[in-house]
Image (cartoon, rainbow, N blue to C red):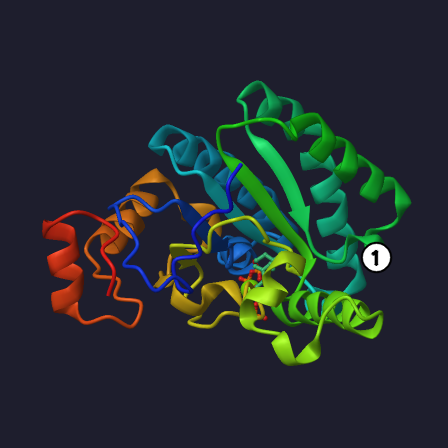
């Protein structure tokens, strides 16, 4: 398979369509959803899993190729121990329940992040799920767990530094493209659309490198309430935007009225 186009690093005007190829989501607001109903925070996390199921199905139907979900950040260890444990248990349970269904739907499942911290048993179940679904060709569902954008960049730098130390790479020749192959999302196109539910307008150490030219969409809707109608609104917002990647609006208009992929 050829390398995907990294639209923000290509000098050419990338062919664009109204439907994103890659959607990345910060699923925020589970705790507030539960609290507003007088329920424990965990009830919100459980409902959050149902919202994930619906979004995965919607992406499949729309022909979206990549869906990347932030499930647990490298900073979420700072939460009370009981919540952290409940979240990890829920992740394990969802894994056992959903992976076979994902496989039946031709969905490829991947996890990115420093998962060693989750312990051997959970890591093994994650690896089994990834192996089972490896060759699936519909949607690629990536779960970011114990993930941090800074961690990702640092671990990629470590790999590159190792190669430089052993003489395989000349430090003077290092460019942003040199780091790409070592990042967790190597070989995946950059997200076209970023969605954050729950009202906060921040990136919270998600895909820092990859979001350089992603269209950002923030909604106050809490994650358990983010249904298909809400997803449609996010997609409509995306479809109405002009992505310029540093070009002028006139260049983009000229490229989209003539042949696609014209050089700047
Ligand atoms: C997002 O919901 C889920 C995780 C971070 C695991 P939160 O648990 O952050 O919900 P709020 O932000 O407290 O409402
Ligand atoms: C971001 O949500 C991480 C996930 C959704 C997994 P947080 O709720 O942890 O983010 P902050 O702390 O409000 O920035
Ligand atoms: Mg939150």
Residue drawn at the location 32% of the way across and 47% of the way down = 230
In the rendered view, would you say 235 is above or below 59? below
Q: Position of residue 133 (x, y in %)?
A: 65, 28
Horizontal side, residue 153 vs residue 92: left or right: left
Query: Which quarter of the rendered picture does the C terminus lie within?
Result: bottom left
Disc 1 crowd rating (10 Å Cα; few below 14, some 14-19, many 20+) is few
Horizontal side, residue 208 vs residue 161: left or right: left
Q: Position of residue 215 (x, y in %)?
A: 34, 62
* The one of 204 and 154 positioned closer to us in this rendering: 154
Pointer 1 residue Cβ closer than 8 Å to ligand 2 = no
In the rendered view, would you say 199 is above or below 115? below
Most extreme residue toward the top is 104
Residue drawn at the location 25% of the way across and 66% of the way down = 244
Residue that label 1 marks = 117
Most extreme residue toward the right is 120
Most extreme residue toward the bottom is 172
In the rendered view, would you say 65 is above or below 22? above
**How many marks are shown on the rendered structure?**
1
> Element under label 1?
helix
Q: Position of residue 27 (x, y in %)?
A: 51, 54
Residue drawn at the location 53% of the way across and 36% of the way down = 1
Q: Position of residue 167 (x, y in %)?
A: 81, 71
Q: Quadrant of ligand 2?
A: bottom right
* The one of 259 and 59 positioned closer to us in this rendering: 259
Residue drawn at the location 70% of the way across and 56% of the way down = 113
Q: Quadrant of residue 180?
A: bottom right
């Amino acid at each position: 398979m050829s390398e995907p186009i990294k639209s923000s690093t290509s000098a050419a005007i990338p062919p664009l369509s109204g439907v994103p190829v890659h959607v990345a989501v910060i699923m925020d607001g589970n705790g507030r959803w539960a609290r507003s109903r007088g329920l424990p925070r965990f009830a919100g996390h459980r409902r959050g899993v149902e919202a994930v199921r619906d979004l995965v199905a919607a992406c499949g139907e729309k022909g979206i190729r990549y869906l990347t979900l932030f499930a647990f950040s490298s900073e979420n260890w700072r939460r009370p121990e009981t919540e952290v444990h409940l979240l990890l248990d829920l992740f394990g349970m969802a894994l056992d329940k959903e992976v076979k269904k994902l496989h039946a739907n031709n969905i490829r499942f991947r996890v990115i992040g420093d998962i060693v911290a989750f312990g051997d048993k959970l890591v093994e179940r994650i690896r089994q799920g990834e192996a089972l679904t490896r060759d699936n060709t519909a949607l690629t569902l990536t779960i970011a767990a114990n993930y941090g954008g800074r961690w990702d960049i640092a671990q990629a730098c470590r790999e590159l530094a190792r190669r430089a130390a052993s003489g395989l790479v000349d430090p003077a020749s290092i460019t942003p493209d040199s780091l790409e192959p070592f990042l967790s999302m190597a070989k995946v196109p950059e997200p076209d659309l970023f969605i954050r539910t729950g009202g906060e307008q921040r990136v919270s150490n998600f895909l820092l490198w990859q979001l350089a030219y992603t269209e950002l969409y923030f909604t106050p809707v809490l994650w358990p309430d983010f249904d298909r109608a809400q997803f449609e609104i996010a997609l409509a917002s995306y479809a109405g935007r002009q992505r310029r990647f540093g070009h002028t609006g006139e260049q983009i208009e000229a490229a989209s009225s003539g042949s696609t992929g014209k050089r700047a």
